[in-house]
């Protein structure tokens, strides 16, 4: 895991001077060393977090005749097998680094080399013979990569602040990026919050040379190789999933540095800890976030898991005051008004704790819900379609259902209104996205406060041919997973120089899950059925049978009242909103009052999200002002 950056100019020589500044601003991604390299048209920078071949794994990696140079952020888990195969074909290596297989693979297979990589990566490759630059990311976007392309020049970096640090790109808000944040809750690749900065989509290769730029997608989730083959079910499905998942955990256990796991007490992280300890013989250091006195606290469950596995578990306490203190730093690393990122700020203290214990790698349960239909929305969608013919009964049924799960009052009415627009959403997206319930609520809430003339939210790619459940899951891989879930782990992990690895998003696990029949995902109302069956022999029954409970911290009591009252006033009052000049000050204050005065209702919940979106936008501007940020939306 590292921080990479670079400048390429096909029209003339590149000044390598800015690379040092670009390196420095990303130093948190790789404090163990740095390097720069340049030729006439290209300059690369690299900050290293030493995990594989700790002593000799510096970058750029190169081929034998120095015509191909590569900087890579990430890990290639099959590098040993690739190295052996390449050596048999006559390639020579200078180190045992996983990155060094890449230039040699490129020599053999051209841009298609990425399809042979089993790993999580963001890659920049310079081919001096062809005078071209290749940028690429892994299948699901575990590792980030951003770039600015204008005329003959390209500037790229692992983080957007690295591009701004070059001094070659102005930092100005993009209206499309703001629109996406106010509807989806985050940006949608290739757009970012910043004008002229592209987020390289997952599973994409971008090739840039003197003739221009081209883009190729090399993987589509849930696109089956043989659509006519029967889907996996029963014992065979459980065994296939179990084998792939165990192998995914095993390959992510580092050889040379210490590793841990963020143990929430939920099924996802607990299953990783159990597989590592009981099947791989590698008990991981564990740590959990403790929300003292809060109903959302899950430490009793994390203690149960640690005790059952014989693991000492540390607990990192988090309070509302501490969360407000961390919020600006969190948004500095997210680089956009990502409102849910505010709720995830406790992860900063958890990764700092891991770093202080001498760890460099942590495991996370990210991706399980998006791959295995772990959210209540999937059951919700199934029930909603069955109720279409019983419109007279929908309101009563939803009222009882939402009350049973402890949802805010008013959610039932919102669900019914969304269900009534299924045809509209199907026409727009090709399928009804499961998160349309949240997107529509956030969009309705932020609509009155948004600047005039803001464009419509970015369109989403239609789902590939598959069963209805997989077509719905497809949207996770284009929205929440790369723009919400994974940035929390990457940005808040690398903020403290911790590489977060995600076994559920292993190449083979994804392929197996695409072949599971729907009932192996949601089975008679039981979500993530395949994982629960596969984990039954290594986890306590209470953990296996737990319903999904997403990690959350209180929003209103932490960020809008109590410890957060002053913070809220500084960003939500009329005078404050008017000073930033983005949102409507009267409508924003009205939204703030709804969030505070109508606690416990669905309207207040959606208003809390909207308040966090406004606060996050302002705080991002505050954080990036030193880089020349414009406070107004670009026209």
Image (tube, helix red, strand yellow):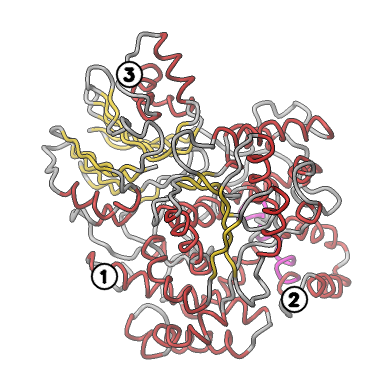
Name the residue: 57% across, 57% down: 287
Q: Residues within 10 Å of mark 1 (few under 14, many from 20)?
A: few
**Pointer 2: what residue?**
413
Query: Magenta residues, as a range?
Result: 416-431
Tag 1 or tag 3, which sits nearer the N-term? 3
| Disc number lying in front (3 or 1) | 3
Is residue 223 in view from this perspective? no
Q: What element carries label 2?
A: helix
- Whether pointer 3 and pointer 1 mark residues with C-beta atoms closer than 8 Å, the reply is no
Q: Position of residue 391 (x, y in %)?
A: 85, 69
- Residue 61 seen anywhere in this rendered image of the structure: yes
Q: Which mark is residue 93?
A: 3
Q: Which of 397 and 60 is in front in this view?
A: 60
Element at label 3: loop
Which x, y percent locates residue 594?
Answer: 58, 87
Q: Could you say which is closer to the camera, residue 152 or residue 272? A: 272
């Amino acid at each position: 895991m590292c921080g990479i950056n670079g400048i390429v100019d096909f029209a003339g020589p590149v000044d390598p001077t800015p690379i040092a500044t670009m390196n420095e601003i990303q130093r948190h991604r790789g404090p163990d060393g740095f390097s720069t390299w340049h030729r006439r048209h290209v300059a690369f920078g690299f900050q290293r977090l030493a995990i594989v071949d700790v002593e000799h794994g510096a970058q750029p990696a190169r081929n034998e005749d120095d015509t191909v140079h590569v900087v890579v952020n990430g890990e290639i888990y099959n590098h040993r097998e690739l190295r052996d195969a390449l050596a048999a074909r006559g390639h020579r290596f200078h180190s045992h680094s996983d990155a060094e297989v890449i230039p040699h693979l490129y020599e053999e297979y051209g841009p298609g080399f990425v399809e042979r990589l089993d790993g999580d990566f963001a890659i920049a490759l310079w081919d001096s013979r062809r005078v071209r630059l290749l940028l690429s990311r892994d299948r699901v976007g575990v590792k980030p990569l951003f770039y600015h392309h204008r005329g003959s020049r390209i500037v790229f970096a692992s983080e957007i602040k690295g591009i701004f640090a070059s001094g070659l790109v102005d930092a100005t808000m993009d209206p499309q990026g703001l629109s996406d944040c106010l509807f989806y809750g985050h940006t949608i690749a290739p757009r970012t919050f910043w004008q002229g900065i592209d987020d390289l989509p997952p599973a994409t290769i971008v090739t840039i040379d003197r003739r221009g730029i081209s883009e190729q997608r090399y993987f589509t989730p849930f696109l089956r190789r043989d659509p006519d083959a029967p889907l996996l079910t029963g014992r065979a499905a459980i065994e296939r999933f179990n084998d792939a998942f165990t192998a995914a955990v095993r390959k992510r256990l580092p050889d040379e540095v210490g590793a841990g796991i963020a143990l929430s007490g939920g099924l996802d992280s607990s299953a990783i800890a159990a597989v590592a300890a009981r099947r791989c013989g590698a008990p991981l250091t564990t740590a959990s976030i403790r929300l003292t006195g809060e109903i959302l606290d899950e430490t009793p469950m994390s203690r149960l898991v640690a005790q059952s596995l014989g693991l000492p578990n540390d607990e990192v306490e988090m309070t509302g005051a501490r969360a407000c203190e961390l919020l600006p730093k969190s948004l500095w690393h997210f680089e956009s008004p990502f409102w849910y990122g505010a709720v995830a700020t406790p992860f900063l203290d958890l990764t700092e704790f891991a770093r202080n214990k001498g760890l460099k790698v942590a495991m996370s349960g990210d991706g399980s819900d998006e791959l295995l239909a772990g959210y209540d929305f999937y059951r919700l969608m199934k029930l909603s379609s069955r109720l279409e013919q019983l419109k007279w009964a929908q309101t009563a049924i939803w009222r009882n259902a939402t009350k049973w799960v402890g949802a805010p009052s008013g959610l039932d009415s919102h669900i019914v209104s969304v269900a009534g627009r299924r045809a509209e959403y199907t026409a727009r997206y090709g399928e009804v996205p499961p998160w349309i319930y949240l997107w529509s609520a956030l969009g309705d809430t932020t609509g009155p406060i948004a600047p005039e003339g803001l464009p419509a939210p970015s369109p989403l790619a239609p789902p590939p041919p598959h069963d209805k459940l997989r077509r719905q899951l497809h949207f996770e891989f284009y929205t929440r997973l790369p723009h919400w879930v994974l940035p929390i782990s990457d940005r808040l992990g690398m903020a403290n120089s911790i590489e977060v690895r995600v076994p559920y998003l292993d190449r083979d696990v994804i392929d197996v899950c695409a072949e599971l029949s729907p009932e192996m995902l949601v089975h008679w109302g039981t979500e993530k059925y395949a994982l629960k069956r596969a984990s039954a022999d290594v986890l306590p029954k209470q953990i296996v049978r737990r319903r999904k409970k997403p990690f959350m911290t209180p929003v209103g009591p932490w960020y809008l009242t109590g410890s957060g009252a002053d913070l809220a006033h500084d960003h939500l009052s009329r005078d404050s909103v008017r000073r930033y000049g983005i949102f409507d000050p009267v409508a924003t204050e009205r939204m703030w009052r709804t969030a505070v005065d109508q606690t416990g209702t669905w309207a207040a919940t959606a208003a809390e999200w909207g308040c966090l979106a406004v606060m996050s936008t302002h705080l991002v501007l505050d954080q990036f002002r030193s880089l020349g940020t414009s406070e107004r939306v670009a026209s």
